[in-house]
Amino acid sequence: MGQLPPHLELQRSRVSCNKDAPIHTESIQYSGAYASMGIDNSSRLDRFSNNFRVEVVRLNEDDMEFDMIGIDAAIANSFRRILIAELPKMAIEKVLIANNTSIIQDEVLAHRLGLVPIQNDQPNEKNTIVFKLHVQCKRGSPRITVKSDALKWLPNGSELVKETRNATSDSSSKPETYTYFCCSQETIPEFVKNPIIPKYPDIIIAKLGPGQEIELEAYAVKGIRKTHAKWSPVATAWYRMLPEVVLLEDIEDDLAEELKSKCPVNLFDIEDLGKGRRATVARPRACTLCRECIRGDDWEKRVALHRVKDHFIFTIESTGALPPEVLFTEAVKILEDTNA
Amino acid sequence: MNAPDRYERFVVPEGTKKVSYERDTKIINAATFTIEREDHTIGNILRMQLHRDENVLFAGYKLPHPLQYKILVRVEVEKHSRGLLMPV
């Protein structure tokens, strides 16, 4: 298999970012595109599996940055869309308000509770999580701020009692509550190790003045973000293509100093050659494509900005329910499921 | 007020098939697949993968309307290959 001539290879694998607009942005997937040259552009599984790499750059508890090399933009975008929209998560959906004398309206309070992220590793249709919030501000005491650590997990289910219509019910029968758990959730092994709490304890939910009270129960269910944004397990997820900065001619001395001072992220370095200084590209990955280095006359002939079409730098910021690497593997499984 | 429910974006109602197939009357070896309750997430990948197949002459997808949750994928293959399987 021969190689494409360099200008065609540039057109096929790089997006050229010119001063006014990028060109060659489409990915040339048609397998016979270079047939006249004798080059086979079709992609086969073996070639893909040889070339494809994932390199993790940074992995924290809440966010992660990694590189995917060798895939197409359509797949990268699908992963991004699935990470944002189709990964399931638990969030508060139904709120039973027993008493709310605060100035926050019922529905606003319920909306705010829905957006609180809950730390839970396994969203499961069978497990509804019940929270209770009971805060009271006594007369004469200063204002209270209700924060999310006031939400208490009730492993035994709901405590509010349903009103039974039947007035002649047996007094010995257990009063009916809104949820019926056959055993306390505390005994389920996953929950023993990680009790369910809101991820961040200092989210302000409401503020109470003296004499006001909030008493409610909230049920969290599993859902996906396509239904409502509160079920999104990522704060956001985005990708960008790897930038590539090429110096078309040797840039020396004063021009090199000028180039180095132009770039706001300092990606050029000056190399001392003894008889002169020369500019080199030190950190191309940091390029934000502000195009400062090609602004002005003549600079376009000296510096060329490209992006590599199949190298994606993904960043995932999780809201905390699941760690980001788990989120990505789940996204891959979902893509596999929908295509199977 | 007139907005459809959010779950309509991915829940296929009873009775409708997820994928349906209609041959093109005017062009031989061309057909349109209608996939219910999907969007660009699947459509773009399908289109990309179809482009990679050597026997495919034409492949494209569109969402007829952003509030109607379905995609139409139109494929035309060469005369000698009549395979209708999805390349995924």
Image (tube, coloured by chain):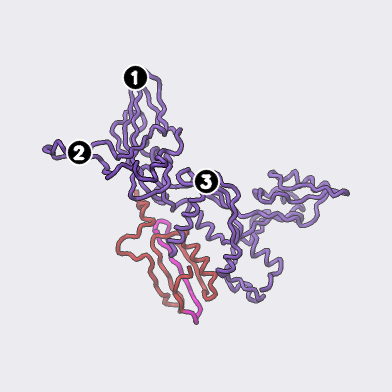
Chain colours: A purple, B red
Sequence-earlier tag: 2 or 1: 1
3 or 1: tag closer to the N-terminus: 1
The quadrant of the image that shows the C terminus of chain A is bottom left
Percent position of residue B77, x then y: 49, 76
Q: Which mark is residue A139?
A: 1
User: For mark 3, does the 10 Å Cα neighbourhood hold few (<14), some (14 to 19), or many (20 or more) residues?
Assistant: many
- Residue furthest top as drawn: A140
Magenta-tinted stretch: B65-81
Q: Chain of mark 3?
A: A
Q: Nearer the viewer, mark 3 or mark 2?
A: 2
Callout 3–callout 1 Cβ contact below 8 Å: no
Work out whether residue A309 or residue A152 is closer to the camera in this orientation and state it: A152
Q: Position of residue A31 (x, y in %)?
A: 58, 72
Q: Dot 1 falls on which chain? A: A
Label 2 element class? loop
Q: Is residue A211 left or right of residue A37?
A: left
Report the Cα–Cα distance between label 3 and label 1. 43 Å
Residue wearing tag 2:
A174
Side of A69 relative to A97 (left or right): right
Report, in whole angstroms, how far the alpha carbon at label 3 lies from the one at label 2.
46 Å
Q: Amino acid at mark 1?
A: Arg
The residue under label 3 is: A317
As measured in the structure, the alpha-carbon distance from the residue carrying label 2 to the one carrying label 1 is 36 Å
The image position of residue B8, as x and y in percent, is 36, 55
